[in-house]
Image (cartoon, rainbow, N blue to C red):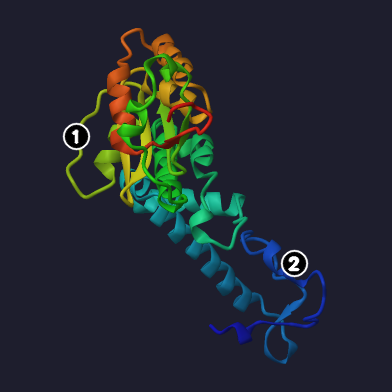
């Protein structure tokens, strides 16, 4: 179908765009009165074809953003769930990769997914993966910069997070489930336990790392602008066995931070 197949009666009407789009995601709504076909006839069928194409395109966008969720649920279940989400949540941006930011919250409310309580957190990890992929570039933090800080000043160091860095926490093994379903590999049983994931992009490759106990509190503190001492305290408060050396090593290896704030002396 060509765009010329649907023509407005009054193309200059200021409310045409709003009326045209308002009914696109409402399958029971009639075609807007301002929309007609050739020779001025009602364009109900033509508009329904266009409406269906829009819905199918948005479902396809969700499928490309959330492949692990689709593999878990199966294609038919996913498309039905995605269709309900599309009707409830129209896109707010012309960029399709921006669509689906509310999908995880929708899954939380979707009654047919209630027996998969970890599914929404898998969706949050996939959304964070895509956001990390599209995040701005920044140089990775180098260990030499931290080594140059005098010992007595280490606690006051503030790290500048890489724009791609995200932390997702779940009451369920969402990181493990995400990893098993992101590709075509085998799927096994998983012990139901809380997991935290660190999503970063180093060397143009997005990675999702399973954080040890206390790791999420540590990284969340750093990402919010807390100094190193406060981040360590947050990690220890969550887990008395929090390993600072391992956390620093993870920060450097993952590229979670890009630099030390310039206020720190002797850096």
Q: Furthest-front residue in view?
A: 266
Quadrant of the rendering where the C terminus is positioned? top left
Q: Furthest-bottom residue in view?
A: 39
Q: How many neighbours does mark 1 have within 10 angstroms: few (below 14), some (14-19), or many (20 or more)? A: few
Name the residue nearer the viewer: 1 or 30.
Answer: 1
Q: On the image, numbered disc 2 is attached to which residue?
A: 19
Asked if 233 appears above or below 216 in the picture, the reply is above
Q: Is residue 12 left or right of residue 74?
A: right
Q: On the image, numbered disc 1 is attached to which residue?
A: 188
Quarter of the rendering containing residue 117: top left
Asked if 121 appears above or below 185 in the picture, the reply is above
Q: Is residue 207 left or right of residue 59?
A: left
Q: Furthest-left residue in view?
A: 186
**Spot occupied by residue 16 in the image (x, y as percentages of width and height):** 77, 72
**Spot occupied by residue 25 in the image (x, y as percentages of width and height):** 61, 60
Identify the residue at horizontal 51%, vertical 50% (top origin): 100
Residue 256 disc label: none
Residue 192: tell me if it is visible. Answer: no
Asked if 142 appears above or below 132 in the picture, the reply is above
**Spot occupied by residue 36 in the image (x, y as percentages of width and height):** 71, 82
Quarter of the rendering containing residue 93: bottom right
Identify the residue at horizontal 53%, vertical 29% (top origin): 263
Q: Is residue 74 left or right of residue 80?
A: left
Residue 28: tell me if it is visible. Answer: yes
Q: How many neighbours does mark 2 have within 10 angstroms: few (below 14), some (14-19), or many (20 or more)? A: some
Q: CA distance from mark 2 to mark 1?
A: 49 Å
Disc 2 or 1, which lies upstream in sequence?
2
**Spot occupied by residue 94 in the image (x, y as percentages of width and height):** 58, 63
Q: Is residue 251 left or right of residue 46?
A: left
Name the residue nearer the viewer: 127 or 32.
Answer: 127
Label 1 SS:
loop
């Amino acid at each position: 179908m060509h765009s010329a197949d649907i023509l407005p009666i009054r193309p200059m009407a200021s409310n045409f765009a709003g009326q045209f789009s308002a009914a696109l995601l409402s399958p029971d709504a009639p075609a807007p009165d301002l929309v007609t076909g050739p020779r001025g006839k009602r364009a109900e069928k033509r508009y329904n074809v266009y409406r269906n194409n829009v819905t199918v395109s948005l479902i396809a966008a969700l499928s490309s953003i959330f492949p692990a969720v689709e593999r878990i649920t199966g294609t038919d279940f996913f498309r039905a769930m995605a269709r309900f989400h599309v009707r409830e949540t129209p896109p707010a941006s012309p960029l399709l990769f921006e669509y689906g930011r509310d999908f995880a919250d929708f899954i939380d409310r979707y009654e047919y997914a209630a027996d998969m309580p970890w599914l929404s957190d898998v969706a949050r990890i996939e959304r964070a993966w895509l956001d990390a992929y599209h995040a701005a570039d920044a140089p990775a933090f180098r260990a030499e910069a931290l080594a140059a800080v005098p010992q007595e000043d280490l606690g006051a160091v503030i790290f500048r997070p890489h724009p791609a860095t995200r932390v997702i926490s779940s009451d369920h093994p969402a990181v493990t489930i995400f990893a098993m379903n992101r590709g075509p590999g085998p799927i096994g049983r998983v012990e139901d336990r809380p997991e935290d994931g660190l999503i970063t992009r180093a060397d143009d490759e997005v990675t999702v790392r399973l954080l040890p106990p206390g790791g999420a509190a540590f990284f969340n503190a750093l990402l919010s602008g807390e100094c190193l001492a406060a981040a360590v305290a947050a990690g220890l408060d969550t887990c008395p066995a929090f390993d600072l050396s391992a956390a620093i090593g993870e920060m450097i290896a993952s590229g979670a931070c890009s630099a030390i704030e310039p206020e720190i002396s002797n850096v």
